[in-house]
Image (cartoon, rainbow, N blue to C red):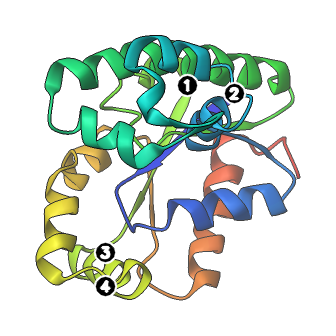
């Protein structure tokens, strides 16, 4: 059974993913796949060089800042980047999920933009990691050193968390001690698939 895991910025999704790994579950991570595709030797690099030129590289290493400067101010160039990366990410992600899926197993897919990228149909169930807005802001101020205005801007740039929660099969609230979050995760796993023990 494939379980999608998503949420919004600073909601604690990475902590939940890490706990699932500690319990022995496989977690396919869309962000990690994206980073690997653009790391030195990554499969996306020749395509990016062809599309955007040598100027986005320092030798063989992608200069993410220069690429960002190009795509964030130009919707067409951003669409071009997405057209290169998204199919590669999706095919790798699907292959990882399928390789670990089995009738007596639970596998998880960590996808920050699961709903935004229309990936819900890939999963049997979806869990959303949630936290109150003020908790998100406090975490961003502490973790990333953002101003409150920048933190709110990043939160508001995403699909509303309440909408994600309404679409999900289950919600994990991380506004409390980590043990509370872990207890919710264990209870949800038992309710979804009680035969499977990590």
Residue 42 - label: 2
Earlier in the chain: of badge 1 and badge 2, it is: 2
Figure check: 3 above or below 79: below
Mark 3 lies on a secondary structure that is helix
Q: Which residue is mark 1?
A: 123
Residue 126 visible, this angle: yes
Q: Sort mark 3 into few (<14), some (14-19) or many (20+) by Cα contacts within 10 Å.
A: many
Quadrant in which the N terminus is drawn: top right
Q: Closer to the observer: label 4 or label 1?
A: 4
Q: Which residue is mark 3?
A: 136
Figure check: 31 above or below 175: above
Earlier in the chain: of badge 2 and badge 3, it is: 2
Front residue (pair 190, 47): 47
**Residue at horizontal 88%, vertical 50%?**
197
**Residue at horizontal 48%, vertical 11%?**
50
Figure check: 1 above or below 129: above
Give me the C-alpha separation between circle 4 and circle 1: 33 Å
- The answer to the question of whether label 4 and label 1 lie on touching residues, with beta carbons closer than 8 A, is no
Q: Sort mark 4 into few (<14), some (14-19) or many (20+) by Cα contacts within 10 Å.
A: some
Mark 4 lies on a secondary structure that is helix
Earlier in the chain: of badge 3 and badge 1, it is: 1
Give me the C-alpha separation between circle 4 and circle 3: 9 Å
* Residue 118 shown left or right of residue 72 in the figure: right
Q: Which residue is mark 4?
A: 141
- The answer to the question of whether label 3 and label 1 lie on touching residues, with beta carbons closer than 8 A, is no
């Amino acid at each position: 059974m494939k379980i999608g895991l998503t949420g919004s910025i600073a909601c604690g999704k990475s902590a939940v993913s890490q706990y699932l790994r500690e319990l022995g579950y496989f977690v396919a991570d869309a962000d990690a796949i994206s980073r690997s595709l653009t790391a030195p030797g990554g499969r996306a690099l020749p395509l990016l060089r062809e599309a955007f030129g040598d100027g986005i590289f320092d030798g063989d290493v992608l200069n993410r800042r220069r690429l960002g400067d190009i795509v964030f101010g130009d919707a067409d160039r951003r669409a071009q980047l997405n057209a290169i990366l998204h199919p590669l990410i999706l095919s790798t992600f699907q292959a990882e999920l399928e390789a670990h899926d089995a009738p007596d197993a639970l596998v998880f897919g960590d996808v920050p933009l699961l709903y935004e990228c229309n990936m819900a149909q890939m999963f049997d169930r979806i869990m959303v990691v949630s936290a109150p807005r003020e908790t998100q802001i406090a975490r961003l101020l502490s973790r990333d050193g953002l101003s409150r205005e920048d933190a709110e801007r990043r939160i508001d740039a995403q699909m509303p968390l309440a909408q994600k929660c309404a679409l999900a099969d289950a919600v994990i609230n991380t506004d409390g001690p980590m043990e509370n979050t872990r207890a919710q995760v264990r209870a949800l796993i038992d309710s979804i698939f009680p035969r499977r023990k990590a």
